[in-house]
Structure formats: structure tokens, C-alpha cells
Image (cartoon, rainbow, N blue to C red):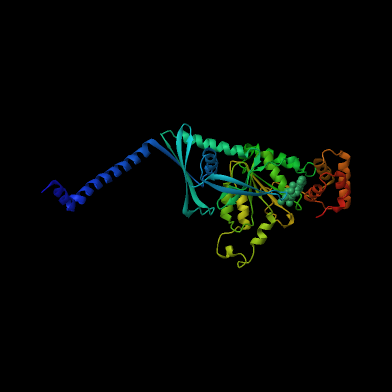
Amino acid sequence: MTLSDFLGALKDNPYFGAGFGLVGVGTALALARKGAQIGMVFFRRHYMITLEVPSRDKSYHWLLSWITKHAKHTQHLSVETSYMQHESGRVRTQFDFHPSPGNHIIWYGRTWIRVERTREKQMVDLHTGTPWESVTFTAFGRNRQIFFNILQEARELALKQEEGRTVMYTAMGAEWRPFGFPRRRRPLSSVVLENGVAERIVEDVKEFISNPKWYTDRGIPYRRGYLLYGPPGCGKSSFITALAGELGYSICLMSLSDRSLSDDRLNHLLSVAPQQSIILLEDVDAAFVSRDLLPTENPMAYQGMGRLTFSGLLNALDGVASSEARIVFMTTNFIERLDPALIRPGRVDLKQYVGYCTHYQLTHMFQRFFPLESAAEGERFAAHSLAAHTELSAAQVQGHFMLYKMDPAGAIDNVAKISK
Ligand SMILES: Nc1ncnc2c1ncn2[C@@H]1O[C@H](COP(=O)(O)OP(=O)(O)O)[C@@H](O)[C@H]1O
Ligand SMILES: [Mg+2]
């Protein structure tokens, strides 16, 4: 038998040939793989640090902006479109790019950090109805300080974007979510109320905020309620927005006629409202009209879902116990429709009528709009307006001025044309 015959026989023999060789290599490979896995686990456990941030965490959105800023070169983005309608009716949209789900590598603090954004397809956050998401940061080393630094930076970045702005929150499920852009602060002086009215409220709120001790010393819950009432378009909402700006507070806007609002949810929301915010309940008179429909007209109630009851609202207002100053503003166009229980002292501590324009308001609005005109012209405008109309809202006057932007004399001469 020649050597080649021998080799040929070996090759043909299934046992010695392919079989034996493969088993050997296979075992070695499996062992190597196992070893590598164990090594990797060991390595990850001892030489890498990770931080997972779920989308429910407050810092999640800050971190997304931070990642966008640092992962400048990433080619994989997702878009978040915000849409805002200005009070004047102008609509502004803005596209915010965020890193898309997947992996991104960021160079930070002299090391590489892997950022993985994951989105669960099957899991939905029941509170908000959005897909469950998280970002995970992975870095070499053992120094957790790097994550603290990142969180800190992300927070500062977010605060900087909010500087000079008023953040609006709405209730989403069991939590408060910022909605739209933070708006540029509206100066208090741009809302012209009757002489002394704005000052009275501002003084009251500031006094309240600066005196937590007075309340704790007496065992009185540290909260204060305000009610602004009067016809529409006279500045209730605008004033509250401007006040929030003046205080550097955000606004938690809540609609009591939201059908998914139950006693429990309201209670919970009031207790978890962001710090330094004003809780704003608009049109409180409307809340219980639409709710007390027949069960057939209100399917939610019919299905036995919880819903807001009047006593639930009172309890929620009374139960707001927090060490933070809790400020609740309510507005209504019809104070006579409100149950006296809702606006008794302790729930509403200060009531203020915000009504149609007075002589004082008209002169001041004119002067603000046409700063180059003499005070006498302002007086003349006010006198003419009041002679022609008994009920003029500030919104109407503002609309009128817009028609005569460059023509103050025309604004005065045509006061009779101010339309509803
Ligand atoms: N007192 C006011 N001074 C300046 N502008 C006002 C005043 N009242 C209302 N406006 C303007 O009219 C519009 C509607 O006002 P808004 O605050 O929503 O009224 P309300 O909440 O009382 O119904 C806003 O664009 C606001 O700028
Ligand atoms: Mg309003």
C-alpha cells in the first residue's frame, strides 16, 4: 500500500476521516467560546460599568438631548416634532433630532462610551401609552463618577434651555409631562389689569412662597388657592402665565373635564406635581356639567371606570400636603355656577374679578402699544372706547390695535368699529 492509498483509505473511512477530526475541532471551539463568554462576563463585571435609564425617569429626556449634543457624528437619528400655536394664532413647528434606537459611540471624558437606546416593541408604558424605552451607558473602568458627571451635565443643559422660559406640563396618565416648547416668559407688564389688581395677587403669592415657617408652625397645610373669574378674553390665563414667569415657576395645566380623570388619579397627580409649579385648573365651572351625563352618554363611567366626583375634587384639593409651596389657580367665566364648597377659604384663599377694560386699562394698553404717543392720546382713546362700548375685553382691544399698528390716530377714531 502506498502512502497515497493509505491517506485515501483514511479519508474514505468516516470514523477516522471527517468524524474524528470534526469532533476534536468542535469540542475545542465550544470550549473556546465558553471560555470567551466567561471571560467577557468577568470582564464586564469587573472592568466595565453600565447605567440604565428608563424612559420614565425624569432625567431621560435630558439625557437624550445630551446624547444628541455629544453624538454629533451619528448618522442615525429619530425626529421629535413639536408644534406650538402662539396666542396670536401663529403656528410654529420645530424638529428636534434625537439619536435613534440602536448603538451610538460617544467620546467623553477621555474614554469611549457606548450608548444604547432600546425600544420595546411589545411593552407599552401603560401610563402614557408610549413604547417602553431606555438608554444604557456602558464605559470601561470602575469609576462611576463619569455617570454622575453626565447626568449633571445633562441637567444643566436642560436647565439652560429653560432659562427665561416657562415650562408647561400636562397630565399624562399618572405623571406630568412637559408639552410643547418652554415658552418665552411673558412679562407681567404685558398683561394690563385694573389698577392694583396684579400687584395684589403678586404680593400675596410672593408672601406665601417666602413664609413656609408660618404654616408649619401652625400646622396649616402649606398651600394657597386662587380664583380668577370674569368674562373671557380679559386676561385670566395670560396673567397666570406671566405670573409663573415672574416667579420662575412652571405651570401644570389640568383639565377637570378630561374623562379619564378619576378621584384617585387627580389625587395622585396633585401630590406628584413638579416642584416650583403652579397648578392651573381652567374653567372649573365646566368640569361637572359634562361629567354628570347619563351613563349611556358617558361610556367611561358606564364601564365602571373611575371618574372624578365633586367630593373627590374637594378631597384632592384639601389633601395636597407637601413641604413645597403648593399654589393652585382656578379660572372660571361663571363664578355663580360654582358650588360654594369649592371656593370657601382654605380651598380658595383669594378671589379676584378680572373684568372688562376700565379707563385705567384702556389708557395703559394704548400707551404700551403706541409708546411714542402722549398720555393725552391714551386718555382720549379710553374715553372714546367707553363712550362707544360698555363691555370691551382686553382681547378685543388688542385685536383692534393690530388693525391700526402704524396708525394710533386711526385706532382712536375707529373705536366704534371694535368687533366682538
Ligand atoms: N389684560 C390684558 N392685557 C393684555 N392682553 C390681554 C389682556 N387680557 C387678554 N389679553 C390678550 O387676549 C388674549 C386672551 O386672553 P386670556 O388671558 O386667554 O383671557 P381669559 O383667560 O380671561 O379668557 C391673549 O392673547 C392676551 O394676550
Ligand atoms: Mg382663559
Relative placement, left or right, of 78 versus 363 is left
Relative placement, left or right, of 362 versus 336 is right
| Nearest to the observer: residue 134 or residue 315 | 134
Horizontal and vertical percent for residue 204? 71, 40
Relative placement, left or right, of 321 versus 192 is left
Horizontal and vertical percent for residue 121? 47, 54
Horizontal and vertical percent for residue 24? 22, 46
The answer to whether residue 375 shows anywhere in this view is yes
Count of numbered circles on the image: 0
| Nearest to the observer: residue 357 or residue 36 | 36
User: Please, is residue 367 above or below residue 418 in the view?
Assistant: above
Relative placement, left or right, of 384 versus 259 is right
Quadrant in which the C terminus is drawn:
bottom right
The answer to whether residue 353 shows anywhere in this view is no
| Nearest to the observer: residue 22 or residue 70 | 22
Query: Residue 162 appears in which quarter of the rendering?
Result: top right
Q: Residue furthest left?
A: 1
User: Please, is residue 160 above or below residue 6 in the view?
Assistant: above
**Image point (48%, 34%), residue name:** 108
